[in-house]
Structures are given as structure tokens and as C-alpha cells.
Amino acid sequence: MENGRFQMSVVEKLSFIRYGGTEEELRAARILQDEIQALGGESELMDFTVPASDVQVCSMRAAAPFERRIECVPYWLSGSLPEGGADLKFFYAPRGVAEDYGGLESLEGYAVMLNSLSFDAYKLLREKNASAFIVYQGKWYDDDSGLDLYSRTIRPKLQEVGRIPGFMITGRDATELVRDGVQTLHLELRQEDVENTSRDVLAVIPGTQMPGQSIVLTAHYDSVPVGTGSWDNATGAANLMALYKHFLAHPAKRTLRFIWCGSEEQGLLGSKAWIEQHGELMDEVKFCFNFDMCGTVLGPNEIYVTGGDDLLHFTQQYTREVGWPANLVQKVHSSDSAPFADRGVPSLGITRRSDTGVIHTHNDLLFPLSEAAMGDIFTFSSGIISRVANSRFMQVACGMPDTVKADLDKYFQRDKKA
Ligand SMILES: [Zn+2]
């Protein structure tokens, strides 16, 4: 089967909700293992735990000056309100900075709505003792109310600051609450911390001449809990499978380590877990290629270059040589290559960005994808990986310049102190 068709067949098989740490993610992992086996290869699952919540109650209604039920989901690991819920004063703080609160010293008894949940805004809410926070999602015209609402986990950096019961509502409801002057909300939230099991799918093709040097190839196969996650990231997972098929038939001089990462959407948990469980291998890892969102009919191609100018120049030169048009951006790719880059591994994040597609919603479907576009990314990626994995010496050495280190510090919020 031609590559594009093979890749799309894998994308189709993976096109269902497969949230990290669920049975459906395990089902997706088994599909990948079956593909590997059908190609004559071997794979294993690497388990790791993901924090989550068991939610007993979550509800919101406007209590004064009018009554109305409001669709909501909780932030996992954000704690609980007292049994029976609480009547809280509603306050909207668009930027979540001190000026937004005017003379309000304490936010105890308040439910504060923010535009987005930044570390600094969250920390200020905690300092001012806010009783709850609300964040909204989506546009006012998304009137399939609640369709794309799903729980997110409070990230570890924010957990360090402390807990504030958190809710997410639609952009439409958020607009109405402020426009109609709601004063009091009745909120209920009871939840318990739990740990789920997620997993990476691993396969290795040993190097024929330099087996002690590894190139890591990553793509996450989990999705968010809405849509079918076809673009994000069944496409990357499928491209990785086409690469596995190719290199199984044409082994490289260096070892190729394929990692289909689980739970990327919950904070790159699969790639972080791999590094944690393979500390002894990290000295061998010389390069990382990551695939997140490929194969859209409309473009352009984009490559996130996380490394120094030598990596940028090498990539530039290669794309010119083979005539593959792409925007090269020298920054951290917010995906599974980031934890490797953070360990000094030169990393390329290969994607195709399209404004016609949309991720993390019920509209991430098969429609904007094509065999031709998938085949194209395979041709490019198999070429550049082959070049790196077969060279007599590494074109780019490990290590990051200070500017990239600073970007990584910022990306991983190491500049933020609880
Ligand atoms: Zn993704």
C-alpha cells in the first residue's frame, strides 16, 4: 500500500476519543501494537500514572438577580466546595491583575471569572483567598452549548500555589453572565483525587553500525475528550507508523526509538515519563523528531527548531536541498519534543498548520486531511531522519544555547515561584 493511503488508514482507525488514562486510550494503544505486529515488528507498553479526579457533583446556577442553570465542568484536582454548595458573589477580572480588583482586599465569598488561567492570575486569587474561579471557553456563537466543555487538570505549578475550586463554562454563558449583571452564583463541586494509568507504545529498530546512539521519534496518540482527534494527533501517530514500516525495511546506522506518547494533552506526561523511566539511556539520545498535527490538505508546513543556529542551518539547508517548502520557527514546540529538548537534545517538531482545521473541539475530524498531504510529510520526514540517522557523525551536537535554555525555562514555568 502506498504511504499516504497506509497513513490515512491508521488515522481512520485512531479517530475516536482516546483521552489519556482511559480505556479508550488503551484501545488506541492496542491498535498501534497490532499495526506494529502486522508489519513484523515488536512493541511494548510503558505504563505511567496520570492524576485525575472522580467528580461526584458539579453544578452552577445564577441565583440573583435572576435564576438560570449554567452548563459547567470542573477543573480536576482543584478541590471541593462545602457539602451542599455555596452562594458566591460573581466578579469578572478580565486580566486577573491587581488593578482588576479595585479596592477589593479579600476575595473570600467570591467566584472570580478570568479570561484564561495564567499562573500569575491564579496566584493572586489564592493570595486574596478567592472561594472559586471560573474560566470560559469558545466563542459566543458556539451554541451547541457545552459540547466542547471538558475538564482540565490543574497543572502541577498551580497546585504548588494551593487549591481553589475551579469551573469552566462556555464563552456564550460567560458573555451573558456579565451582560445581564449576575450578582450571585450558586456553585456545587465535590471531587476526589484519583490516579489513572496511561501508557506509551514503544518500538525499537536497533542501529546497524552505531547501536549505542539513538534517535528518538515521538508523536502523541491520545486526544482531548471531544472530537475524534484526527488531526491532533492521529496524523502524527500514523506518520510515525509509516516511518516505522519504512525503517524496519531499511534499518539505519543509529538506533531508532519510536515512542507513541500517551497523555500529551494533559501536560506532555508520556514523554516526561519515558525520560524518567529511561534515565540510563538519555546519554545515548542524540536527536529528537516529533510529529504533532500533520496531513491537512491546506498548509503551510512548519518546523519548530528547538536548538541552536547549527540546528536551524542544518534544517534550512536540508529543506532547500529537497525543495520542501516550510516555515522554520526557532522555538520550543509545545509537544512531546520539549522534554527532550530540555535535556539538551536537538529537536525538530514537524507539523502542518492550517487555519481551516481546528483542534481540541468536536470539529477535529477527518475532513481537512488527505492521503496526498500525509504522503508528503512522510517523504520529507523519512528523508531527513535517514540523513541524521545514517551520517558518520552527528551534524548537530547536543546542548542548548542560553537563549533556548531561557525559552525552555519559561515554557516549563521554572521562572514562576509559588
Ligand atoms: Zn497535539
Image (cartoon, helix red, strand yellow):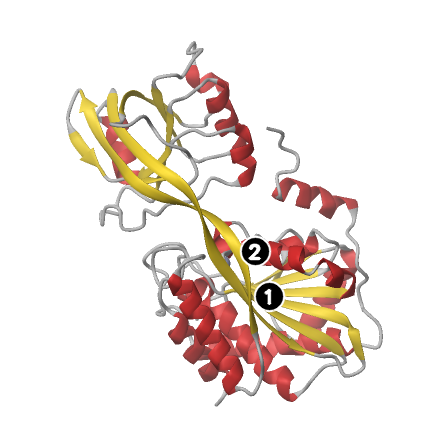
Q: Give the CA separation, mark 2 to mark 1.
A: 9 Å
Q: What residue lies at 74% left-to-right and 44% top-to-bottom?
A: 403
Q: What residue type is labelled 2?
A: Ser
- Asked whether, in this view, residue 98 is left or right of residue 318, the answer is left
- Asked whether, in this view, residue 306 is left or right of residue 28, the answer is right
* Dot 1 crowding, Cα within 10 Å, few <14, some 14–19, many 20+: many
Residue for badge 1: 218
Give the mark count: 2
Whether residue 89 is visible to the viewer of this picture, yes or no, is yes
Quadrant of the rendering where the C terminus is positioned: top right
Q: Which residue lies furthest to the left in this view?
A: 67
Q: Which quarter of the figure has residue 409?
A: top right
Q: What residue lies at 78% left-to-right and 44% top-to-bottom?
A: 402
The image shows residue 217 at horizontal and vertical percentages of 63, 68
Residue for badge 2: 335
Q: Which quarter of the figure has residue 324?
A: bottom right
Q: What element carries label 1?
A: strand
- Asked whether, in this view, residue 202 is left or right of residue 396, the answer is left
Q: Does the residue labelled 2 lie within 8 Å of ligand 1?
A: yes
